[in-house]
Amino acid sequence: MSYIGQETSTATIQTICSDADVFVVCYSAVQPQSFKNVKEKWLPRIRNFMGDIPFVLVATQTDLRKNPAVLKQLQNKGLKPVSQNEGYALSKRTDYACYVECAPHMERKVKQVIDKAISSVLIPQGDRMEMQSCTIL
């Protein structure tokens, strides 16, 4: 629903999301603005429109956190990659079903994202508290 440089209207979000059972909310570990958007825009919107719907928080491109070229680009802008601890801390402050870190070459992790999204819907809301410790790194 989020496209770089484009805003999605509130009405569009409500229409698209009205039948959702779970959200997979992603941010790039090497694009701090995407993490900020998740924290300040998407998570509040999901909670506002969808209440207690479960979500899986996913850090993508985690393999690039240590890439010298990426680090140099970020450093030139006065930025740094979003750390694993920052992602985990955000997931702990919010009512998440699971926190997952993945990269394109980590096919098993991508499958785990999908599996956790499905299981968060199948587990009754009262039992989700046991899932609060779910972190896949």
Image (cartoon, rainbow, N blue to C red):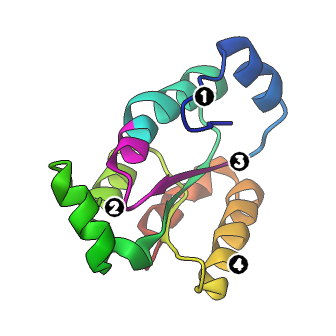
Label 1 Cα crowd, 10 Å radius (few <14 / some 14-19 / many 20+): few
Q: Which residue lies furthest to the top in this view?
A: 11
Q: What residue type is labelled 2?
A: Tyr
Label 1: which secondary element: loop
Q: Residue at x 76, y 63 (%)?
A: 118
User: Could you tell whether 16 is left or right of 41 in the image?
Assistant: right
Residue that badge 4 annotates:
111
Specify the amino acid type for callout 3: Val
Mark-to-mark CA distance, 4 and 1: 26 Å
Q: Which badge, 2 or 4, comes first in the chain's sequence?
A: 2
Mark earlier in primary sequence (4, 3): 3
x 27%, y 60%: residue: 73
The kind of secondary structure element at disc 3 is loop
Q: What stretch is highlighted in magenta?
A: 22-36
Q: Give the residue drawn at x 58%, y 31%.
A: 46
Residue 111 versus residue 104: which sits nearer the camera? Answer: 104
| Image location (x, y in percent) of residue 111 | 70, 78
The numbered mark, 3 or 1, whose residue comes first in the sequence reads 3
